[in-house]
Image: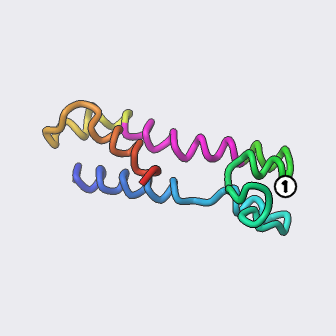
Amino acid sequence: MTILWAAGLLLLAYLSGSLPIGYWMGLTKGIDIRTVGSGSTGATNVLRSVGKTEALIVFIVDIAKGYLPVWWAMVLEPSLWSSLGLPPYTIPVAVALMPVL
């Protein structure tokens, strides 16, 4: 069961990192954010091209989608991951790297 938790958490981290929040926020205003400004889907381009409120939402959600899976892995670390025989914080580090992949 622990291996399933680890695999599920890694998958969740990977999928959360792939959510294009800035793109979706641009679509709410009818703007394809990838075709305006710098072409980035990040909060700065959303700020320039869509608006302040939308950029703040993108900023907060982008931070949360990177922070929450790592926090969850660290909370579960002592009880679950140690039973796999892994060095401390192996899973949280792997989870932190998943959105980058």
- Residue of label 1: 50
Quick check: 99 above or below 60? below
> What residue is at 76 percent from the left and 66 percent from the top?
35
Disc 1 secondary structure class = loop
> What residue is at 37 percent from the left and 51 percent from the top?
9
Quick check: 41 above or below 35? above
Magenta residue check for 48: no
Place of residue 18 in the rendered image (x, y in percent of width and height, measured from the top left): 52, 59
The colour scheme of the drawn protein is: rainbow
Camera-nearest residue between 69 and 40: 40
Horizontally, residue 83 falls left or right of residue 32, namely: left
Quick check: 76 above or below 24? above
Camera-nearest residue between 58 and 73: 58
Which quadrant holds the C terminus?
bottom left
> What residue is at 16 percent from the left and 43 percent from the top?
84
Q: Residue pushed farthest front?
A: 38
Horizontally, residue 21 falls left or right of residue 36, namely: left
Camera-nearest residue between 76 and 41: 41
The secondary structure that most of the magenta stretch takes on is helix
Magenta residue check for 62: yes
Q: What are the residue bounds of the magenta stretch?
A: 58-73
Horizontally, residue 13 falls left or right of residue 88, namely: right
Place of residue 40 in the rendered image (x, y in percent of width and height, measured from the top left): 68, 56
> What residue is at 45 percent from the left and 44 percent from the top?
69
- Hey, what amino acid is under mark 1? Val
Place of residue 38 in the rendered image (x, y in percent of width and height, measured from the top left): 73, 55
Are there few (<14), some (14-19), or many (20+) residues within 10 Å of tag 1? many
Camera-nearest residue between 1 and 66: 66
